[in-house]
Amino acid sequence: MTEPRPESAGAPARPGTAVVTGAAGGIGSALVRRLVADGHRVVATDLPGPALETLSAVTGAHAVAADLATEDGVAAAVAGAQAYLGDVDLWCGNAGVEAGRGLETSEGDWALAHDLNVMAHVRTARLLVPGWVERGRGRYVVTASAAGLLTMLGSPAYSVTKHGAVAFAEWLSATYRHTGVVVQAVCPQGVATRMYAEAGALRDLLGRDAVLTPEQVADAVAAALEHDDFLVLPHPEVATYYRGRAADTHRWLAGMNRVQQALERAPLDQDGAAG
């Protein structure tokens, strides 16, 4: 007999306040548009530039320019959001980067990926979670990737740091869920963003089930705000792959290596980046 699912504790059922990082394009932009359409008061944060300014002008979201790959940038984003919104009900940690290629990935690219894909979440949680615990509610949604549950051939820094993002989100959930803090990890596969467009031969692998639009991912996130399930899988097939990986890791790795060999027979576009 299963226990009844508890009602959502992390955010009010009615529209609240929300922040989206990495908001100037792709999934981030779609999240801003969806949250605004659903009635949330939204802060959109990204690196300074015309894309962020245009998004703000079109949607009415309040723009806060900040570099989430730095400790000072995270602090500026949180402070700017709180100055405009007051309490933050929902933080969508969407900013991320794919950097480097294979074992030749530079120290700088590894550091950037770690700072943005992992430490931005750590630094944000340090600033937000204590307040959420005190008031008894708050929700942190991490945009990770299917790469964070599986792997991304050709892109070790992305794979490792997205695993790190999922692992940190798991730790947050395990540590704070009884306090009213809800943590969710969004793990899509192929999404029609710049990263996917530049994925070279990996596009066939990423798009084997479906290539979703950023808006479809935003719809999946909006639906997930109605419950507290940890994993948000816009591509439901990822759940099957994830179970297969856990059930027989050796067999799964052998299968991934066969894919790697096929990619080597059809080399990646040297200008491409894995998504």
Image (tube, rainbow, N blue to C red):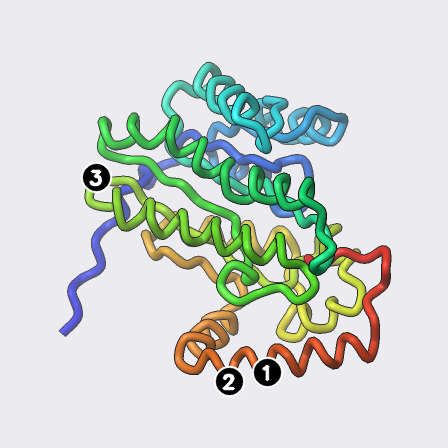
Name the secondary structure under disc 1: helix
Left or right, residue 87 beside residue 266: left
Residue 176: x and y, percent? Answer: 26, 42
For mark 3, what is the residue? Answer: 179
Name the kind of residue labelled 2 in the image.
Answer: Arg
Position of 168 relative to 212 (above/below): above
Residue shown at 44% from the left, 31% from the top: 124
Cα distance in 3D space between marks 1 and 3: 41 Å
Name the kind of residue labelled 1 in the image.
Answer: Gly
Residue shown at 59% from the left, 22% from the top: 64
Position of 89 relative to 103 (above/below): above
For mark 1, what is the residue? Answer: 255
For mark 2, what is the residue? Answer: 251
Q: Any mark on residue 202, and which?
A: none
- Quadrant of the image occupied by residue 70: top right
**Quick one: 163 or 178, which is closer to the camera?**
163
Mark 3 is surrounded, within 10 Å at the Cα level, by few (under 14), some (14 to 19) or many (20 or more) other residues, namely some
Cα distance in 3D space between marks 1 and 2: 6 Å
Name the secondary structure under disc 3: helix
The number of callouts visible is 3
Cα distance in 3D space between marks 3 and 2: 39 Å
